[in-house]
Image: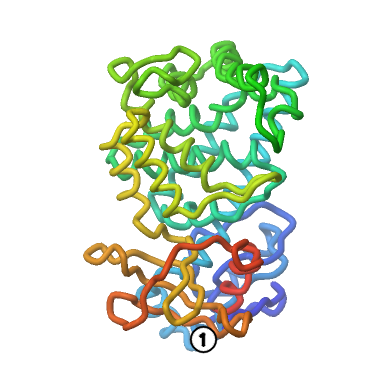
Amino acid sequence: MIIKVSISDLAKGHFVVDIAEQCGTYNLTRAGHIKSHEMIKDLQAKGVESVLIDTSKSIHDALTVELAEQDAAAAPLTLEVNKAQKLFNQSKQLQQQLFFDLQQGRTMNIGPLIDATQQTINAIFKNPDALICVINIRNKNQYLLEHSVSVAILMSVFAQFLKIEKNTIQQLAIGALLHDVGKIKIPDGILNKAGKLTRQEYLHIQEHVKFTIEIIKSTPNISPLSLEVAALHHERLDGSGYPLKLKQSEISNYGLMIAICDTFDALTADRCYKDGYTHIKAFSILRKLAHEGKLMPRMVDLFIKCLGVYPVGSLVELNSRHLAIVESRNQDDPINPKVRCFYNLDSRRYIMAKDINLAKESDFIIRGVKASDHNLDMNRIIEFLLLAG
């Protein structure tokens, strides 16, 4: 059972899964046992006020603590998500400050962007699924900020899947994080218009890429690769994209990747005037765009393989009339992942969370769903699963 305890009540042998409250910015590197009083003092010194502990793993024998620490299992997805969400929010705050500085006429400082993307890439190499899961937890009123961070995460996860080396991934992530920065020069009334755009409004929105290129070119120490990624995110293989109307032979592999990541996130994100599509529907649209000659078919297939048919962190409806969150994939059976069941659709209530390997059970997935399809909130779901342990 996961419970919250104050730092003054923390004891040797407790199994700490995460920080609950603090006055600093310290992040646990991983869950683990408290092996000494010095560890508690160190947490206090870092400003930690309370922590989450797993009572089922807490022990009180010193030797047993040492052995358990050596054999500790990986933290559940929901606990990793809690950490990943902090990283996501830090990147979003950085993006907000960056936009504000540019609106005030100040030159963009690339230093914090380098630090943020490095942390994100390290987290992705440790557990890409946790950050992908966080992308599902979105604020409809902060689309511009969250979209940029999400595209940077998707781009980094995709690049890692393609075995691109870390230094290059960081440059790709910076370009992805900045790909929509030019939208600060587009009026909010056009950006967030609920109805159909007029031709003039659509042409005005297209100018954001030119503004992005201008901003990046005027910023010291940004690599040409980061500029390339940001500049190409709306180009299409058939020449119908913008601003340069490039065709397939003129678009780099990185340009092909950012176009897919940007389109996928735009399709799946909830906005103030519309709900996003499920992952399955978004994959279907990506394949349709590839068939129409706008996106590279091979890259689309690799992207879907990277995220999985049912991406980790996505919600699914089971034949048993339950909702579940995808916890991990079965590589040999991609349509039957491992899930965590948490909600009864007939009684419309949360139930005791249960882990199910669909490859070994009679239950199966009916469809992918969004939390909003059943008047649920993704933040509340993650909170429930975290407390369920």
Q: Residue 326: x, y in percent?
A: 43, 66
Q: Which residue is mark 1?
A: 56
Q: Quadrant of residue 52?
A: bottom right
Point out the image quarter for the C terminus.
Answer: bottom right
Residue at 49 percent across and 55 percent down: it is 278
Residue 328 horizontal side relative to residue 301, left or right? right
Q: Residue 314: x, y in percent?
A: 48, 61
Few, some or many residues within 10 Å of mark 1 (<14, 14–19, 20+): few
The residue at the far left in this view is 332
Q: Number of numbered discs present?
A: 1
Q: Is residue 295 above or below residue 388?
A: above
Q: Amino acid at mark 1?
A: Ser
Q: Residue 133: x, y in percent?
A: 50, 57
Q: Residue 321: x, y in percent?
A: 49, 80
Q: Is residue 160 above or below residue 7?
A: above
Residue 203 horizontal side relative to residue 257, left or right? right
Residue at 31 percent across and 32 percent down: it is 296
